[in-house]
Amino acid sequence: MKPETATRLIYWLLSDDTGLSSKQIAMHMVGGFDIRNSPPSDAWDRGRCIRLLQQVPEWMERIEEMKQYAGWMEPVELIKKGDGK
């Protein structure tokens, strides 16, 4: 991971705009351990995922990878459309 990506990720992690689903995206993208599968359950959760991807935009091109986890098919499509609060 590039240092500037790591810096943006750290700032995001230290913010109050995180949730289980956005953390699952982050952990998947950095190749870390898999936290509890937690697809976004509503627009608020999707919004946190979208804002993570705005913070680390290079991950948007890999968001399709999240479809390998149960329950992520529809949320990934909504995230790609920017459907979140």
Image (tube, rainbow, N blue to C red):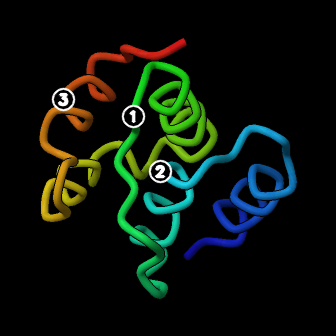
The residue lying at 46 percent from left, 87 percent from top is: 33
Mark 1 crowd level (few <14, some 14–19, many ≥20, 10 Å Cα):
few
Q: Secondary structure at mark 2?
A: helix
The residue lying at 55 percent from left, 23 percent from top is: 44
In the rendered structure, which amino acid carries the disc numbered 3? Glu
Which circle marks residue 21 in the picture? 2
Q: Is residue 31 above or below residue 60?
A: below
In the rendered structure, which amino acid carries the disc numbered 1? Ser
Residue denoted by label 1: 41
Give the Cα separation between the discs numbered 1 and 3.
14 Å
The residue furthest bottom is 33
Residue 65 horizontal/vertical position (percent): 20, 60
In front of the other: label 1 or label 3?
1
Residue 24 horizontal/vertical position (percent): 46, 62
Q: Return the residue nearer the eye: 41 or 51.
A: 41
Which circle marks residue 77 in the picture? 3
- Say which label, 2 or 3, has the lower sequence index: 2
Q: Secondary structure at mark 1?
A: loop
Q: Is residue 30 above or below residue 61?
A: below
Q: Return the residue nearer the eye: 2 or 63.
A: 63
User: In screen coordinates, is 54 left or right of 15?
Assistant: left
Q: Is residue 28 above or below residue 67?
A: below
Labels 1 and 2 touching (C-beta < 8 A): yes
User: In screen coordinates, is 50 left or right of 16?
Assistant: left
